[in-house]
Image (spheres, helix red, strand yellow):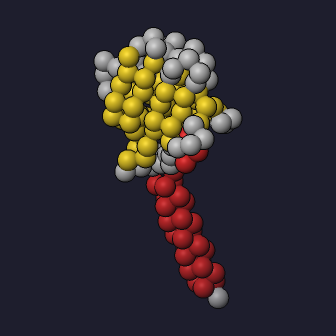
């Protein structure tokens, strides 16, 4: 009778260690950022700033960006991260300074490239 209790104790201990090890292994993986579908599409303001964002193989791509202050960019891959209610994005490659924040249905472009918030184009 004692040996059965001892075997149960060992089995429960082994199962607990295996489960904890499996859970710990999962928590070490970096979180996968899924692109918010609301951010995709064409965006613009009344001062001539425009941005088109697309999802390419689960990576955010700035298909085109135009600004009265800067000229523009085409086909630049963006890093995306969630920061509370904000979705932040920035350029992956060096030499290009482009970043922005999406929140509450508008996009704010950093580095004074756009003076106003970008709103989604209704016709696109």
Residue 32 or residue 57, whichever sits in front:
57
Horizontal side, residue 59 vs residue 31: left or right: left
Q: Is residue 72 placed above or below 102 in the rendered structure?
A: above
Q: Find residue 111 and report its horizontal and vertical position in percent.
A: 49, 14
Q: Residue at x 37, y 51 (%)?
A: 57
For the view shown, which residue lies furthest in the bottom direction?
A: 1
- Please give the name of the residue rendered at 33% of the width and 34% of the height, measured from the top-left corner: 75
The x and y percentages for residue 10 are 55, 73
Q: Is residue 92 visible?
A: no
Give how far across and how far down residue 94 sits, in percent. Answer: 31, 21
Residue under the point 56% across and 43% down:
123
**Which image quarter: residue 66?**
top left
Q: Is residue 122 among what the camera can see? A: yes
Which of the 4 quarters of the picture holds residue 44? top right
Q: Residue at x 52, y 43 (%)?
A: 124
Quadrant of the snapshot with the N terminus:
bottom right
Q: Left or right? Give the position of 112 relative to 92.
A: right
Q: Nearer the viewer, residue 44 or 112?
A: 44
Q: Considering depth in this image, is 33 or 75 the residue closer to the camera?
A: 75
Q: Which residue appears farthest toward the front when viewing the image?
A: 123
State left or right for residue 104 relative to residue 10.
right
């Amino acid at each position: 009778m004692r040996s059965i209790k001892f075997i149960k104790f060992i089995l429960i201990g082994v199962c607990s260690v295996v489960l904890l090890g499996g859970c710990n292994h999962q928590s070490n993986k970096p979180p996968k950022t899924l692109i918010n579908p609301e951010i995709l599409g064409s965006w613009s303001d009344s001062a001539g700033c425009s941005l088109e964002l697309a999802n390419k193989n689960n990576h955010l791509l700035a298909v085109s960006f135009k600004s009265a202050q800067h000229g523009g960019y085409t086909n630049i891959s963006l890093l995306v991260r969630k920061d509370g209610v904000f979705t932040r994005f920035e350029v992956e490659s060096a030499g290009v300074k482009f970043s922005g924040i999406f929140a509450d249905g508008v996009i704010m472009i950093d580095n004074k490239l756009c003076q106003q918030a970008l709103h989604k184009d209704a016709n696109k």
